[in-house]
Amino acid sequence: MSAVTESSLATQALLAGGDKRRKRTDRTMTALVWAAFVLAAAPLVSLLYTVIVKGLSRLNADFLLFSMRNVYGGMDAGGAYHAIIGTLLITLGAAIISVPIGLLVAVYLVEYGRGVLARSVTFFVDVMTGIPSIVAGLFAFALFAIFFGPGIRLGVMGSVALSVLMTPVVVRSCEEMLRLVPNELREASYALGVPKWLTIVKVVLRTSVAGLTTGILLAVARVIGETAPLLIVAGSTSSINFDMFSGRMMTLPVFIFDQYKAGPVPCRAGVADCLTNINFDRAWAAALVLIVIVVILNLVGRLVTRVFAPKLR
């Protein structure tokens, strides 16, 4: 009996020692995870804080409602209205081009793609994902220059350039979301005699609408801040232009670049050795507006997801 008791006590001691080691390991890993989170979040928080603090100093109604037309030097006037309009229109045009193409390619790869063609499409999508943004701009410029001459600059050219960058992101993200749909749902639909195309539309796409929306928004966020291709194909202007098929069109990234490039300017009062950072202030305010647009798009995406996602009962 004494031997059994001693064995039992030894077992309990071993278990207690194992529990202590597990608790120490758990606390250590938890601390490491939190440290990694703080390390990753610190640059983001710092960036947001800097943009908000510096951008709010210039952000006002005039900045949002007026363009830079007839604004020169260190004039404390003008805004980014023309750049906001250009960013929204060009990004919308890129989405109109990219989303249908990317979604259809993703459906093909998941539901129909087999053999050499599917592998080739996957390979080229991977290649396009790594294309430098300026190459996309050169492609759009070369394409339109064939028909309109080398001096052409249009807003629609910016949409085409951004769609080259946006399409592979849409394909990859939508493909992954479609693969997450359980095959049992497809088989149940087929068992009821529903055609495959209708199963894809009513079951597969309906089930994955939340992930598809998120993937599309990620693609929009990928291209909305691009500068290099838009400098080449859409150009720069200080005037408001609503027509994507006529004339140059300003965008927020290019506006930020132009204002930063202009640098400090002499004070209007003509005081010696006096410089004003009005151009930098405009650049920070435009950066804040660009971030706000991305946030609004994400909120709209979450709303769409909540409205159209399948309801669990």
Image: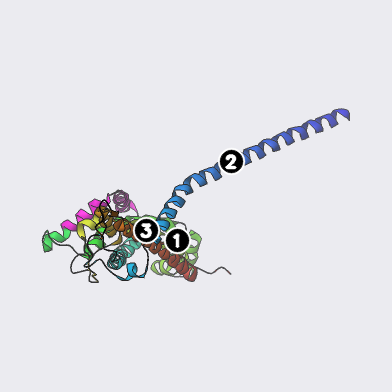
Q: Amino acid at mark 1?
A: Gly
Query: How far across and down, in percent of the image, does residue 64 sit?
Result: 34, 68
Q: Which badge, 1 or 3, comes first in the chain's sequence?
A: 1
Note whether residue 224 is visible: no
Q: How is the image coloured?
A: rainbow
Please name whichever residue, 252 or 49, is drawn nearer the observer in this view of the structure: 49
Single out the residue that lies furthest toward the front: 271
* Magenta stretch, residue numbers: 114-142
Category of crowding for the residue at label 2, using alpha-carbon neighbours closer than 10 angstroms: few (below 14), some (14–19), many (at least 20): few
| Residue 157: quadrant of the picture | bottom left
Please name whichever residue, 31 or 64, is drawn nearer the observer in this view of the structure: 64
Q: Amino acid at mark 3?
A: Ala
User: Is 26 a magenta residue?
Assistant: no
Q: Which badge, 2 or 1, comes first in the chain's sequence?
A: 2
Q: Which badge, 2 or 3, comes first in the chain's sequence?
A: 2
Name the residue beneath numbered marker 2.
29
Left or right? Give the position of 230 relative to 217.
left
Name the residue beneath numbered marker 3.
221
Category of crowding for the residue at label 1, using alpha-carbon neighbours closer than 10 angstroms: few (below 14), some (14–19), many (at least 20): many
Q: Secondary structure at mark 3?
A: helix
